[in-house]
Amino acid sequence: MKTNYKFNSLEMTITWFFLISTAVLALNQIVGESKLFELPSQQIYRFFILFSYCTCILIIFSFASHNGIDITGINTLVFLIMLLILISNLINGINITDSIISTCWGISFITGYAIGKSGVFAGYRKTRIIIFIAIALFSFYSMYSNSIKANGVTNIIGVNYIFYFGFPLYVRFADENNPKTEILLSVIFIIATFISYKRTSLIAVGLALIIYYYNKYARKKSIKMKWLFLLSIIVFIIIAWYANKYTDGRLLERFSEIKSTGGNGREEIWKKTLELYSNSNFWQKCFGHGSNTVIKSIYMNGYYLSAHNDFLEVLYDYGWIALILYLVFIIRIFALTASAKRNNSPNSPLFSAVFVLFIVISLFSHAELYSYVALPLFSLLGALYAINRPENINERCSIK
């Protein structure tokens, strides 16, 4: 979307704070899981979530003064879902801080929409690169430290979610004019994903990157572009081979165990979640049990567990009404993703990749439940949605 609008210092500053605060949330999650430092991790998390939330509201109203607030369509749908979440939390006695945090994904989407509509995502390229490299290096160090303490096991739950965070951050600074830099950063990202030892991360990121590079390079008529796609596949295979060797074959072994273990008990978790919902009363089926309450009800193998599926989590936490609206929201995004591809939007590869990443995470883990994932992921979805609306397609806007 081309715009002659000049961003003032306040708008540039709050957008910069938004990028930094999402990064701090990601880094804080690693700190909390890896115990690298003795920090009040939960307090820092809550502070930066609320800070980010306030920043989102500032962005929405600041950019709205120039572009207007879009109160129709998908933003209204998101607002209705957020309202249902707040009602559910109010009915079930959830405290105000957790109630606000539970709507983080929605405010992030609306924020991304406002920023995407204004065109400000064209900036901050160097800042994004610095943030990404900082998170990647910190992740490597955390996994290395954890492997020493845990006899070679690099798996840290917090790091797992950083890759869900990291992919949107990575694609935000994808540079069409510098594919070598793009591939180099991809290599860093793929290596980190492999040695994270998490299957869901690897599947989500792997599919997203393949779709991204295929749509961006392989479908082009240029021989050079096809070679770049082939090179990216070769690099992926080489990294996979070394990662499996590094883990003494355990990486591929974990994938072979998926059928026998049911994805680390996911099948059983899903069945228990549905059973808990079916035993709920009428009002609980309509409005749910409140934010993040599955984890208070399912205890398996010595752990309290969430639903490991966004749709089941929304169903149990907020009820069937919220689930239907949430499904409509996802269908709307999918429809625009398909439309962007049909219309050859320059952002189609990015939009398709992020949507696939989002769906895989939603099916086997969580995208909307955890704010340090929701902030960057949904803000980017919102920006891409705004840019790829039919009235903007012909302007050939791209995110750099």
Image: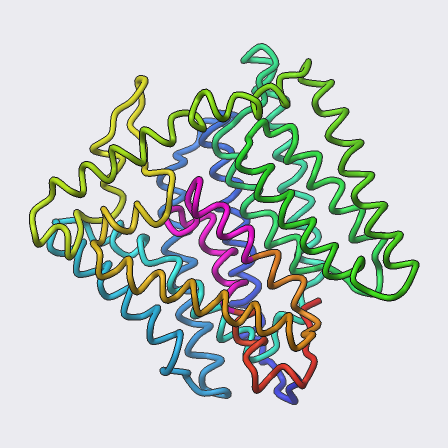
Q: Is residue 143 left or right of residue 366?
A: right
Nearest the viewer among 209 and 400 is 209
- Residue farthest along the right direction in this orientation: 223
Nearest the viewer among 103 and 257 is 257
Figure disc tally: 0
- Give the overall secondary structure of the magenta segment: helix
Query: What sort of colour scheme is used for the picture?
Result: rainbow
Does residue 193 lie above or below 94 as drawn?
Answer: above
Does residue 191 lie above or below 258 as drawn?
Answer: below
Query: What range is drawn magenta here?
Result: 355-382
Measured as percent of width and height from the top left, residue 105 is found at: 40, 58
Report the residue at 57% width, 69% height from top.
338
Nearest the viewer among 12 and 211 is 211
Nearest the viewer among 1 and 226 is 226
Report the residue at 37% width, 57% height from top.
104
- In the picture, the quarter occupied by the N terminus is bottom right
Measured as percent of width and height from the top left, residue 71 is found at: 36, 82
Does residue 260 lie above or below 399 as drawn?
Answer: above
- In the picture, the quarter occupied by the C terminus is bottom right
Q: Is residue 306 left or right of residue 202?
A: left
Q: Is residue 274 left or right of residue 75?
A: left
Answer whether residue 375 is magenta in the image.
yes
Q: Is residue 350 left or right of residue 161?
A: right
Report the residue at 85% width, 45% height from top.
231
Answer with the quarter of the image where residue 366 lies: top left
Answer whether residue 2 is magenta in the image.
no
Measured as percent of width and height from the top left, residue 163 is found at: 58, 42
Measured as percent of width and height from the top left, residue 246 is found at: 72, 18
- Residue farthest along the top direction in this orientation: 151
